[in-house]
Image: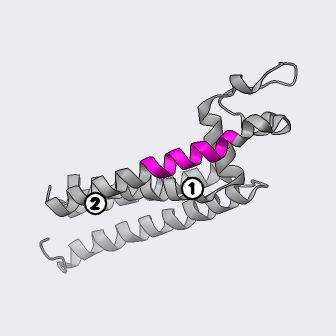
Amino acid sequence: MTFNNLLQMIIAALFLIVFTFCTWYEGSEIMDRPWEWKYSTYFTQVDDDQAMDAGDISNFDHFVYAAKFKPLFPFLMVLTASYLIILTGYILFKRSIKKVALFLFGLGVLFLLSTGFVSNSPTVGGNIFQAFFLIGGMIAIIGAALYYFRMLTGLHTEI
C-alpha cells in the first residue's frame, strides 16, 4: 500500500467517525418523539401492546431515525463508507483488472438491492437514500463493465 492510499484511508476513516457521531447525535432526537417509536425503532422491536420508555431504545435506532428525518450526516456517512470500501477493493485487487471489475459489479448489485429496502419511503431521507443507492449501483456496474472491457481491448495501462 502506498503512502497516498494510506493517507486516503486515514482521512476517510476520520470523516466516517465524525459523520457517525453526528448521525447518532441527531438521531437521539427519537427519544423525545414517542409517536415515532412505532415506525422508526426497527432494532428495538416495539409492539403496540408493549409499554416502553426512551431508555429502552437501541442506539441503532438513532441511526434509522436520523436517516429518515435528518439525512445529511447519514448520507455523508454512507458516502464515506462507500469510498472506503471502493478504496479497499482497489488496494486489494489492483493487480487483477478482472477482480476489480467483479468487485465493482458486486458492489453495484449490493447498492441496487439496497434500493429495495428504502423504496416507497414517505420520508425525505428514504427518497435520498433510494436515489443514492440506485445511481451508485448503476455507476458501479457501468464502471465495472468499462473496467472489464478496457482489459479485453488491451487499452489498459499499468498503474
Quarter occupied by the C terminus: bottom left
**Tag 1: residue type?**
Phe
Q: Which residue appears at 14% of the width and 55% of the height?
A: 1
Residue 63 has which mark? none
**Label annotation for residue 73:** 1
- Check disc 1 and report its element: helix, strand or loop: helix
Whether residue 80 is visible, yes or no, is yes
Between 47 and 94, the residue placed more toward the observer is: 47
Considering only vertical position in the picture, is 75 above or below 148?
above
Q: Would you call the spot at circle 2 few (<14 residues within 10 Å), some (14-19), or many (20 or more)?
A: some
Labels 2 and 1: the sequence-earlier one: 2
**Residue 45 in the figure: left or right of residue 85:** right
| Badge 2 element | helix
Q: Residue at x 51, y 45 (%)?
A: 21
* Residue 77 pos. (x, y %): 50, 53
Which residue, given by chain and number where applicable, does mark 2 sit on?
8
Image height check: is 48 above or below 96?
A: above
- Up the image or down, 30 lies above or below 150; here it is above
Q: Does any portion of residue 95 appear in the rendered image?
A: no
How packed is label 1: few (under 14 Cα within 10 Å), some, or many (20 or more)?
Answer: many
Q: Nearer the viewer, residue 101 or 60?
A: 60
Does residue 59 lie above or below 74 as drawn? above
The amino acid marked with disc number 2 is Gln
Magenta stretch holds residue 99 = no
Q: Is residue 88 left or right of residue 110?
A: left
Q: Which residues are magenta?
A: 17-28
Q: Residue 61: x, y in percent? A: 65, 36
